[in-house]
Image (cartoon, helix red, strand yellow):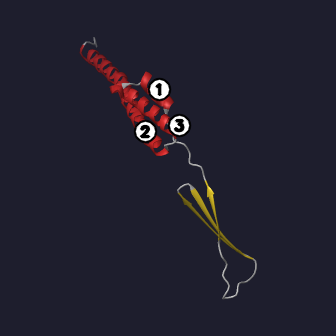
Amino acid sequence: QEWLQLYQLQGTKLWFFRCCSTRTLRPHEHAEPHQTAVNIPAEPPNDNIIWALVSFVHENPFRLGLVALLYSLKARDRKVVGDQDGARRHASTARALNITATVLISLLVFLCIVVPLALIAETARYHYRHYSYN
């Protein structure tokens, strides 16, 4: 018994070819493959609305959180209407804006903590060197 299986994912359809022979074929006989199409539902795009809300409320450098929130709402509206491509486009833009806002606020917080600590340490070192009584 010989089995030949070929799986090919094409868009949202999975094409399945299978040849099965239970006996030896003669040279003039051909095994015809059976073709079956199975629909795989496309996963709806993630609109990142929670991340956009957090960016809007807490991390809002250059108003990127507000713009990300607006794009997230547009993506949600497009998803409700059924425009999956438009929803993916808006969700992708919202995600990029959320990433940018998060990176910028992280750098800002890092600099606001590290730079004052470095200045305090340098000042303490300077005072220790020049004003010590030893």
Element at badge 1? helix
Mark in front: 3 vs 1: 3
Element at badge 3? helix
Sort mark 1 into few (<14), some (14-19) or many (20+) by Cα contacts within 10 Å.
some
Q: Is residue 108 left or right of residue 40?
A: left
Q: Residue at x 51, y 38 (%)?
A: 81
Q: Amino acid at mark 1?
A: Leu
Q: Is residue 77 left or right of residue 128?
A: right
Q: Residue at x 67, y 78 (%)?
A: 31
Q: Is residue 62 left or right of residue 39?
A: left
Residue 73 lies, in percent from the top left, at 46, 31
Residue 4 lies, in percent from the top left, at 65, 72
Q: CA distance from mark 1 to mark 2?
A: 15 Å
Q: Would you name the residue on which mark 3 appears?
A: 80
Q: CA distance from mark 3 to mark 1?
A: 19 Å
Q: Amino acid at mark 2?
A: His
Q: Would you name the residue on which mark 1 appears?
A: 53
Residue 122 lies, in percent from the top left, at 29, 21
Figure label count: 3
Q: Which mark is residue 90?
A: 2
Q: Residue at x 48, y 38 (%)?
A: 78
Instruction: Pick whichever of labels 1 and 2 is earlier in the sequence.
Output: 1
